[in-house]
Image (spheres, grey):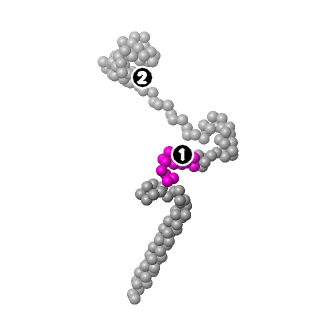
Amino acid sequence: MGIFDIFKHDKQGSHDQAAGGAEQTKEQVQEQATAAETPADRGAPGEPPAKYADPVAATREAADRMAARARVTPEEQHAASAPKPPPEKAAAHEAPAPAPAKERTYTVKSGDSLSAIAGRELGGEDRWRELYDLNRDAIGADPDMIHPGTVLKLP
């Protein structure tokens, strides 16, 4: 017997014990399953058990079991109906509101007109008046006189 043979022997012994334990567990599970079955549960060979013969009834039984597990106790119902904190206190625990989206702008280039800008940026040349109303202070009294470098706000 060599120095490492002792380790081989120990591994074989533990492997044999584990296999025996697994077989024993498997037998126990089969015994419990057999003990839980009633004669009405067993169907003819090759047919499903009688308790599953009617799928509608099986579904109802499953739904009833689920509903029974989901029943709300009076304590849970009281906790659910408890008054909620005022919105300002609840907001303190929430994440801060996102910053407002940056305002869209357009810098006028040489040869631009309000109708051309409205067509490119707003989807229609007929929206030039909306653009002018929003930027009247930057454009001035004459909508036909826009200067390169002027920054316009877009709706």
Res 60 label = 1
Q: Nearer the viewer, mark 2 or mark 1?
A: 1
Upstream in sequence: badge 2 or badge 1? 1
Q: How far across and how far down the image is residue 70, in percent? A: 60, 47
Three-letter amino acid code at disc 1? Arg
Q: Locate residue 69, reporting x and y percent.
A: 60, 49
Farthest residue to the left: give it. Answer: 111
In the image: residue 141, left or right of residue 92: left
Residue kind at label 2, given as amino acid type: Leu
Q: Which residues are magenta?
A: 50-65
| Residue 29 in view in this figure | no
At 66% across and 35% down in the image, what residue appears?
A: 86
Quadrant in which the C terminus appears: top left
Left or right, residue 38 beside residue 80: left
Left or right: 44 with respect to 147?
Answer: right
Q: Is residue 126 above or below residue 54?
A: above
Query: Residue under circle 2?
Result: 154
Give the CA distance from mark 2 to mark 1: 60 Å
Q: What residue appears at the point 52 percent right and 66 percent down from the top-left corner?
A: 31
Secondary element at image label 2:
loop
Q: Nearer the viewer, residue 154 or 79?
A: 79
